[in-house]
């Protein structure tokens, strides 16, 4: 059980340091909210509020010095790995709850997805990814998305914008069942199929490009499997930079380079909108 709370650092009272102290306090609040046992009660509103507040803060612009101050803070660095795990669990739970709420509507249309709070974020992120991918591949080729989850907004946007058949891969049976239901009710099951499988065991041979979601764990194993089953595919790996690493794991670019992956391009997170950035790779 965690007992040592984050403590304010003795920085000077400049505006820059005020923002650092404020973020440290938000991290403290998020950790506390995520540490409450909510078994059997779904996702409490306190968890949603804490996660959204942290999202708001990490989307803001920070200097390199501020990022260093926060990420190397004694208690933040100690809690960081555990915080990432708790955030991933909370995000998966919130997404499942949202997908289930959509699934019980008497009528479900694509416009209903547009009303979801994350739709604008994914519109921006996927738009940047497809713009970059468009310089490498023609539209309409089969694509795969690893870690699509119960509410596959990215896969839907990719299919609608590219006209590409998309295969969603997720290891969670509940996520797969809910996403299949939603896609069927939206009339998209012919263009987007869902496969329950570990990303590190799937056969990627039919796919010209593979997207790997930010919450996928063991990305190195997934990329190794992609290389072994289709070496010439383009891989779009979502990562996090700067202060956004408080919420999502950062891809080790040096490790991927050593494994023979060549960086083709990268997107940058849209300030105050998108948290993730994306790296495009292909085997050398």
Image (cartoon, rainbow, N blue to C red):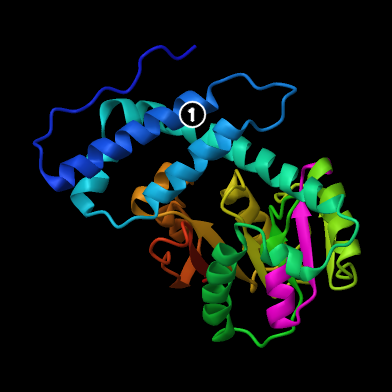
Depth check, front residue: 272 or 209: 272
Direction from residue 279 to residue 219 in the image, left or right: right
Vertical comparison of 197 with 26: above or below: below
Depth check, front residue: 195 or 54: 54
Which quarter of the figure has residue 109?
bottom right
Which quarter of the figure has residue 23?
top left
Residue extending furthest toward the front = 106
Considering the numbered disc 1 on the image, is that residue within a helix, a strand or a loop?
A: helix
What residue is at 80 percent from the left and 53 percent from the top?
102
How many tags in the picture? 1
Which quarter of the figure has residue 234?
bottom right
Depth check, front residue: 35 or 111: 111
Q: Residues within 10 Å of mark 1 (few under 14, many from 20)?
A: few
Question: Residue 123's spot in the image, x, y percent?
Answer: 59, 70
Direction from residue 269 to residue 282 in the image, left or right: right
Residue 274 visible in image: yes
Depth check, front residue: 154 or 225: 154
What residue is at 64 percent from the left and 52 percent from the top?
222
Vertical comparison of 280 with 4: above or below: below
What residue is at 50 percent from the left and 45 percent from the top?
52
Residue 196 visible in image: no
Boundaries of the magenta span = 156-173
Vertical comparison of 117 with 101: above or below: below
**Magenta highlight on residue 158:** yes
Question: Residue 145's spot in the image, x, y percent?
Answer: 70, 62
Residue ID for mark 1? 82
Question: Residue 26's spot in the image, x, y percent?
Answer: 37, 35
What residue is at 27 percent from the left and 47 percent from the top?
67
Vertical comparison of 233 with 105: above or below: below
**Magenta highlight on residue 165:** yes
Direction from residue 174 to residue 217 in the image, left or right: left
Question: Residue 53's spot in the image, x, y percent?
Answer: 45, 43
């Amino acid at each position: 059980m965690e007992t040592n709370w984050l403590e304010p650092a003795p920085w000077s009272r400049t505006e820059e340091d005020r923002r650092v102290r404020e973020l440290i306090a938000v991290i403290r609040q998020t950790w506390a909210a995520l540490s409450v046992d909510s078994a059997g009660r779904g996702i409490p509103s306190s968890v949603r509020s804490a996660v959204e507040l942290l999202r708001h803060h990490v989307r803001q612009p920070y200097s390199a010095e501020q990022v260093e101050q926060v990420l190397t803070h004694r208690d933040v660095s100690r809690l960081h790995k555990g915080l990432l795990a708790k955030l991933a669990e909370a995000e998966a739970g919130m997404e499942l709850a949202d997908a289930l709420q959509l699934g019980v509507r008497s009528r479900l249309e694509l416009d209903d997805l547009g009303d979801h709070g994350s739709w604008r974020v994914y519109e921006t992120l996927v738009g940047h990814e497809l713009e970059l991918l468009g310089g490498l591949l023609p539209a309409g080729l089969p694509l795969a998305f690893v870690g699509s989850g119960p509410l596959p907004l990215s896969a839907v946007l990719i299919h609608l914008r590219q006209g590409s058949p998309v295969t969603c891969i997720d290891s969670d049976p509940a996520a797969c069942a809910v996403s299949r239901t939603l896609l069927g009710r939206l009339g998209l099951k012919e263009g987007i199929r869902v496969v329950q499988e570990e990303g590190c065991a799937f056969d990627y041979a039919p796919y010209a490009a593979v997207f790997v979601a930010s919450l996928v764990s063991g990305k190195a194993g997934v990329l190794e499997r992609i290389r072994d089953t289709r070496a010439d595919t383009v891989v779009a790996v979502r990562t996090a930079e700067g202060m956004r690493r408080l919420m999502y794991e950062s891809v080790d670019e040096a490790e991927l380079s050593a494994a023979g992956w060549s960086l083709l391009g990268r997107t940058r997170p849209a300030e105050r909108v998108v948290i993730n950035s994306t790296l495009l790779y292909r085997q050398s």
